Amino acid sequence: MKILLIHSEEIWYKTHKPAVKNPPDPPGEFQAENAAVVFVTIEKGDGERAVNEASKEIVKYAGETVKADWIVLYPYAHLSSNLEKPRRAHSILIRLESKVRELWEGNLHRAPFGWYKEFRLHGKGHPLAELSRSIEEQGRVVFRVVDGEVTVSEAVSKGLAPQCLARRVKRLEGLAGEKEELFGLRSWNSWLALGLVERLARRLESLGRPWGSLYSLKPHIPPENLDDIEAVARLYSEAVASRALRAGSPLPSAVVRVGVGVEFLDDLSNEITRRITRINACGDPPCLEVGASGEILLYNSPKGYCFPIGMVTEGSLLLGPLGNIVKAVVDHEASRAEVEDWVPRLPAWMHPVTVYIIPVSGASEYALSIARDLAALGAGVVVDESQSSVGGRVRSAGRLWVPLVLTVGGREAETGTVTVRRRWRPGSQEAVTLGELLLEVRSLLSWSGVSGFVLHLP
Ligand code: A3T
């Protein structure tokens, strides 16, 4: 939402002819003195937050800053190139009017929407007589598709976005305020974690093993308290029974080799298996015994706690809950990075966001077109146009452990390049051409089990 506030000696207007089909307000003529005239442009996606912020600004300006007798809300479609459609713009304006009315005891008038108006305005000309404000609907989340915008749930239903986003749309919309962390990885337990689990599940499914099903049963196992190992074993057994998983499917040899079946976690796997303890719940007391049925795989965190990530049944290895496996990977990587002083990262295929794009100085269209090209390759892309500084947005991407962070501005748009920061090369950045970027992303995504998407944070 854009507002232009003008402290006026006098305002007068008269409607001429409709500027939209069937204007929602009747025509009229109006005149007032000592008015705070507020030209309002409603932008796409404006909602409750913009209405609340704008009404506070307006009432503060009229009441405290210039001490006006009137507030005149004047719909004006010329302050932005990102206009909301008339019907919705009108209803937002009505909400703005009623919010201002709640906060303001003086006179209030709203000019008719959807008309060409002749007007006369006499600005007072003192230093605070003219003021403009841009109010962002922070955290608004929009998916851009080739021919326009869709909401997150539409994007998911059309297969444009991963399922994990739909399940936590609410959380996603509060992205800016998200504080939860898992060992420095932001947004644990929210869309990011769900995205990691989702990708892990797809990967497992693509390997055609029975274990992929276990995660959906969500056995509730408190990750940090495993006093009752038999209860854990029971949970696994129930999970197995209730899902009628193919009993007796053979243990793939690769799994046997590394012991726990996380060999698909690329270079992390060999390291991570050193942290696995295997406990046979059938023993009394529970004992270490490799390869037997009933054996539970426990991940031991260097931070001193452990949680289960799988169980051996007759001839099969059940991996899960998948959330625990993701947690183990993150924990393992974060603690290794801490000790060896590097920046922790995840296998690129596992991360729901491959590329985070930060447009600067009006390179928005350029950024979105790159995003669409990357999404077509199967990459998850965030375009962050929030108002924070470039540094702030780079840090946001860092907290999400996004592999590639791009900044694009006027210079990049002119030369068809992007400036890229790679998570595995901290502290350095490089300009590359779009062609090079596409090749790099393609090789990062050697496996991609979900379709690409663009998440636009305006
Ligand atoms: C005018 N003053 O601008 N935000 C605000 N108003 C809008 C919007 C929007 N997104 N969309 C439509 N009229 N309108 C006049 C000029 O003299 C309204 C607004 O009243 C606008 C009219 O519809 C035509 O766009 C034209």
Image: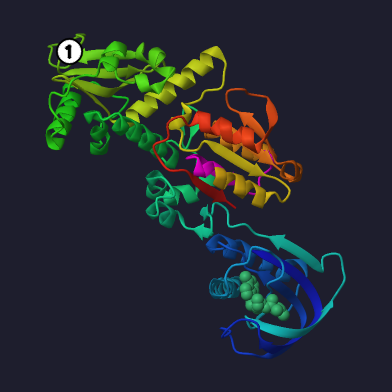
What residue is drawn where x is 48% and y is 22%?
334
Q: Nearer the viewer, residue 90 or 257?
A: 257
Q: Residues within 10 Å of mark 1 (few under 14, many from 20)?
A: some
Q: Is residue 221 visible?
A: yes
**Residue 251 occupies quadrant:** top left
| Left-right relation of 26 to 191 | right
Verify whether residue 379 appears in magenta: yes
**Residue 4 occupies quadrant:** bottom right
Q: Is residue 165 above or below residue 335?
A: below
| Left-right relation of 450 to 230 | right
Colour basis: rainbow
Verify whether residue 90 appears in magenta: no
Quarter of the image where ligand 1 sits = bottom right
Q: Is residue 73 visible?
A: no
Q: Quadrant of the N terminus?
A: bottom right
| Left-right relation of 1 to 125 | left
On the image, numbered disc 1 is attached to which residue?
286
Query: How far across and down, in percent of the image, does residue 225 sit?
Result: 28, 24
Q: Nearer the viewer, residue 263 or 47?
A: 263
Query: How far across and down, in percent of the image, does residue 430 sit?
Result: 69, 29
Query: How far across and down, in percent of the image, does residue 269 sit?
Result: 39, 17
* Mark 1 Cβ and ligand 1 under 8 Å apart: no
| Left-right relation of 409 to 44 | right
Query: How far across and down, in percent of the image, does residue 391 sit?
Result: 68, 37
What residue is drawn where x is 60% and y is 49%?
368
**Residue 247 occupies quadrant:** top left
Residue type at mark 1 is Pro
Name the secondary structure under disc 1. loop
What residue is drawn where x is 59% and y is 75%?
97
Q: Which residues are magenta?
A: 374-390
Q: Is residue 312 above or below residue 29?
A: above
